[in-house]
Image (spheres, helix red, strand yellow):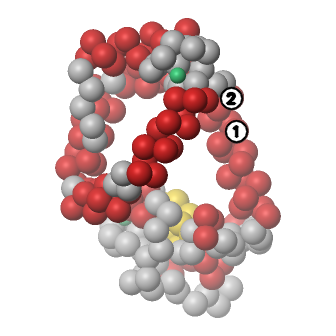
Amino acid sequence: MSYTRPAKRAWRLRRKQLGLCVDCRNRAEARRAKCRPCLTKGDEYRRLHPRAEYAAKYRDGHQDTNRVYQREYRAAHSSELRAWRRANKDRLNTHTNNRRALRNSLGNDLTREQWSAIKAVYRHCCAYCHRKAPLTQDHVIPLSKGGATTASNIVPACKPCNSAKRDREAPTLPPVRLLV
Ligand SMILES: [Zn+2]
Ligand SMILES: [Zn+2]
């Protein structure tokens, strides 16, 4: 999480709203904060200064810090975030549609009955934290790694656990072999 001074942040936002590159004022790429040359410059910089590994290590050590920070940020900016979602409906829809397309292309034969049966096997508790909570369908092998939406690849997860896992695989997980 990098900190940007409020004044600088406001200035970058202004540029972005005007569709100008936040670095050099030239016309920015569609839906990007920077123009093509500045984007390339950034790519080049990152290539020469490979921090990805360091950043990943940092994130692993600071997951809770980040989560707390994010929760506080969301609480403090809830109306702005709501406004952003309202203004970017098409973007969010694209995300949802892409995900649905991916889901269908990988196989999606989970029936409502199977989902009920899976939840019953787990006694209507989250497969990760074992708490009783509203349950979501969690892919044991994530969609991003080619996991299908099929009974043997779905476990119930509460929302916090589902989003905590994100695209990582959870090998410690006991996916129940279903008899449905
Ligand atoms: Zn630029
Ligand atoms: Zn959970």
Q: Is residue 1 above or below residue 162?
A: above
Image quadrant in which you'd find residue 130? bottom left
**Distance between the Cα atoms at labels 2 and 1?**
6 Å
Label 2 close to label 1 by CB (< 8 Å): yes
Drawn side of residue 42 relative to residue 110, left or right: left
Count the marks.
2
Question: Percent from the top left, x then y, of residue 14?
Answer: 45, 10
Label 2: how many residues lie within 10 Å, few (<14), some (14-19) or many (20+)? Answer: few
Question: Percent from the top left, x then y, of residue 93?
Answer: 68, 36
Q: Which residue is mark 1?
A: 94
At mark 1, the secondary structure is helix
Q: Quadrant of ligand 2?
A: bottom left
Question: Percent from the top left, x then y, of residue 78?
Answer: 37, 25
42 vs 174, nearest the viewer: 42
In percent of the image, x 57 and y 14: which residue is there? 26
57 vs 22, nearest the viewer: 22
Q: Is residue 121 above or below residue 149?
A: below
Drawn side of residue 14 relative to residue 150, left or right: left
Quadrant including the N terminus: top left
Amino acid on which disc 2 is placed: Asp
Q: Can you tell me whether the CB of the residue at mark 1 lies under 8 Å from the nearest atom of ligand 1? A: no
Drawn side of residue 75 relative to residue 146, left or right: left
Q: Which residue is mark 2?
A: 90
In percent of the image, x 51 and y 83: which residue is there? 175
In percent of the image, x 43 and y 47: which residue is there? 46
Image quadrant in which you'd find residue 69? top left
In percent of the image, x 46 and y 68: which residue is there? 168
Q: Is residue 148 above or below residue 65?
A: below
